[in-house]
Each structure stands twice: as C-alpha cells, then as structure tokens.
Image: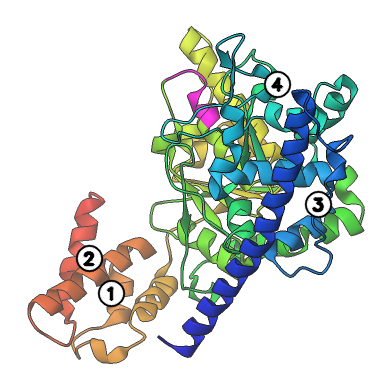
Amino acid sequence: MSPGVKKQLDLAISGEDLNATVLNNEIAWFTAVLKIRFDRHFGRDAGAEDITAAPPPDLMHDQSGFAHIVREFDMGFDERLIIILALLPHLQPHALDSFLLNNKDLARGFSEFGGWKGKQHSGFLPTCETAVFILAGNDLARRFQVMRLFQEDYYLSKQGIIKVVHASSGEPFLSAALMITTDYLGRMTTGQNQRPDFDVHFPAKQITTTLTRDDLVLSAEVLDEIDNIIVWLRHSAKIMQQWGLVKNIKSGYRTLFYGPPGTGKTLTATIIGAITRSDVYRIDLSMVVSKYIGETEKNLANVFDQAVNKNWILFFDEADALFGKRTQTSSAHDRYANQEIAYLLQRIEDYPGVVILATNLKANIDDAFARRFQSSVHFSLPDQAQRLRLWQGMFSNATLLSADVDLVMLSEKYALSGGAITNAVRYAAIQAARMAREEIVHSDLVKGITRELIKEGRTQ
C-alpha cells in the first residue's frame, strides 16, 4: 500500500470514528426524548414536562462530519431529531422497535406512530407522522409547526438532506416515508459522498474521462461555445446573485449538442465536467421511457430530485428519443405523449444546473425545447487538418507505428469522424497484438478504416 493511499485510508477511518462517537451521543439523546414522549402519551410519570427537557448534545466544537452539517445549517432541536430519526434505520434499527407496540383495544398498531414496512427490512421505518408524534404529541398547533419542516421549500428537502416519499396520491401528507438521502447518509456516517446506485429508480450513470480540453479537436466556434458553458459553471453564482440578474434570468443552462455520430459530443460533456469538477451523469433513456402512464415522469423526477443541489451536469444522449417533436393529438396516446414532453420541458427549465441534450439530427428535437436552449452547438465531421490532429493524438508514442504508416495520407484520403478513427486504431492495435508485433503497420490501419466505412454504408 502506497503512503498516499494509506494516508487517505487513515483519514477516512478517523472521520468514521468521529461520526460514530457523535452519532452514539445523538442516538442516546433521541432515546431520552422518545422515552419522555411515550411516558407522557401513555400517562406515565415522565419526570419532565416536555421533551425539550432532554437537550441535544453540544456540537459547537465537535469536528465530525455530522457536526459540521448541523452547524452549516444551524439545525435546531426539531431538525436534529428529524435527521436522527431518518438515520436510525441505517444505524440502530432496534432503537425504533418501541413503535411496533400493538394497541390492545384495537388489536393493531397505533396510528399516531405512523411508520411503514419495507420489503426486506423487518423493523419499523419512520414516516413524517412518526416525527410529528415525537415532536408534537397531540398538540394540534405544534403539529402544524412541525409539518412545515417537511415542505419542499424548507431547507431539509430543498438542500437534499431528507426525502419525503409519498407512496400514492390521496393519502394524508404525513403518511409519507421519511428518508435520509444517499448523499447525506454517506457524509454523516463514513464521511464520504456516496454515489447513487444505477437502477430503475436512478436511471443515470456517471461518465468520466482522463482527457483534457487540449485533447478536443473541434472548430474555434465550438470551442468558444464550450468555454461559455465552463464560465457559466464557474461564475453563475456571481452573475445571478452578486450582479442581481437572478430577477430576470432563469437559473441553469441548457444546451443542445447536435451532429453526426462520433464527432465528440459525449467526450465534450465529460471534459466540461472534468474542467469544472462537476459530476456528469448520462441518462439511460432505455430505463427512463416507459409505456405505462406516469412512469416516464416518475423515473425522470428521481434523477432531477437527486441532482438539484449537487451541481451535476445531466447529459441526455440520443435525446430525440425523449425530446422529439410533439404530434397532433389524434388519440389518447398522443395526448399523453405530449403531456410527457411538457413535463420534461418544465423540469429542465426548473433545473438550476447544466443540462446537455445530444442528438444526431437537430430537426428531430421539439421546437419548444430548442427555443429555450441557451446555445445550440454543431459538431461537424472533422476536416483534413483536424483528422490529422486526431490521428497524431492517437499515437503520441510514435514508436508504435511502423515506417510504412503515413498519417497525413490517411487523414487526406479517409473522411472519418473522431469516433471512427478511435475504432480503427483499436482494431489495428488488436491485430498487431494477435500477430505478436510491437508495431502497428499500414495494412492494420487500413483494415480498421475499411470496417468503419462498411458500418457507415460507405466504400471510401
């Protein structure tokens, strides 16, 4: 193990130890509060007039990640109790077992406790009602105060600390499941930012690259547009807040990348992310689009909800599959499809980060989206000079090429995209390895090029 890796591991372990210590104290405080609430609710001697008789631990000088978050948001008694309640199923689920009591008069659980059952988890999982019961009991005015803490515009939800998940419409607001988000679960426990799991509930994958802006072989006009996006990512807060333009300019930045396959649309998105240190997530449209009414919107909502406070770049590849032109409403299916597009348009407009839509044909994108883009960037096929730069960039180690390879000739003779050149080089390298050669020869590259031309339906 290298010294650098060992140091990072030691720091991670020390962060976990700090969080474990402070969370143990927080759980002890929660347990004391819960005992007072149960004693008062069931008419037992609580030894205290109110749950606030059990003060939360002092975190003023604590150096744990959990304490930093509490101080960052200036969390009070109520917010801290909600947070630890949402954390407990992950930390000490048995601390909530007292909520599994049955009402002997009704031979069922106590409805005032709230809660929901998971598919695999056998313990008690809290709802907003659970938190309101602990904090307010039967005090109706106090219940109204606590209910405000679960609204979308309150910082607990707005900043992506908790999730309030409603299983179905029409049920009481407080019956919604109370969950800690994946991001804050990691920060409050291991001290690490956890990436969301790629599944049907989060149909997006992070994409990265080791390349830099210098590796982009694009026209000056395209590079200028890329720089505009980078400047926005770095200075949007200054433009919107310090310069006071937030009143007139909608937050976020929306752009359309269009052009033939293999011209660098995806690579450019990942390089923008690398330059600005922003995570780039490519949306998997095969998992987003659903034939069932409401499912497409629900799948996309999961992505937007998790991304909203994290400065992520959302990249929709082959976007015309989702953002295509609306049709005439000749059937119920057409009306639903158009409603779906309207929903997508609204979510993209409301997203405060950068959204990049990529398509091979600009004409396929619905005009309503195109009008609202801050830029449309055309990625054209590279000219001869750009193709030569691409070929040369592939072989920074010139010793890999045999003497018969003429990159200038290849760039002049074959009009290929950057992606096709990459595939041709990969094929040539495989052939050299198969033949146990240390050099790539001219015929290897020509065979790779021919394969790419055939795929595109061309012979030259």
The amino acid on which the numbered mark 1 sits, given as a three-letter code, is Leu
Q: How many marks?
A: 4
Task: Find disc 4 in the rendering and name its residue.
Answer: 173
Task: Find disc 2 in the rendering and name its residue.
Answer: 449
Closer to the observer: label 2 or label 4? 4
312 up-or-down from 166: above or below: below
228 up-or-down from 319: above or below: below
Closer to the observer: label 3 or label 4? 3
Q: Alpha carbon of mark 2 to alpha carbon of mark 3: how far? A: 68 Å
The amino acid on which the numbered mark 2 sits, given as a three-letter code, is Ile
Give percent across and percent down for residue 324. Answer: 50, 31
Q: Alpha carbon of mark 4 to alpha carbon of mark 1: how far? A: 66 Å
Task: Find disc 3 in the rendering and name its residue.
Answer: 56
The stretch of residues the image draws in magenta is 292-298
Task: Find disc 1 in the rendering and name its residue.
Answer: 410
Secondary structure of residue under mark 1: helix
Q: Alpha carbon of mark 3 to alpha carbon of mark 1: how far? A: 71 Å
Residue 295 lies in the magenta stretch: yes
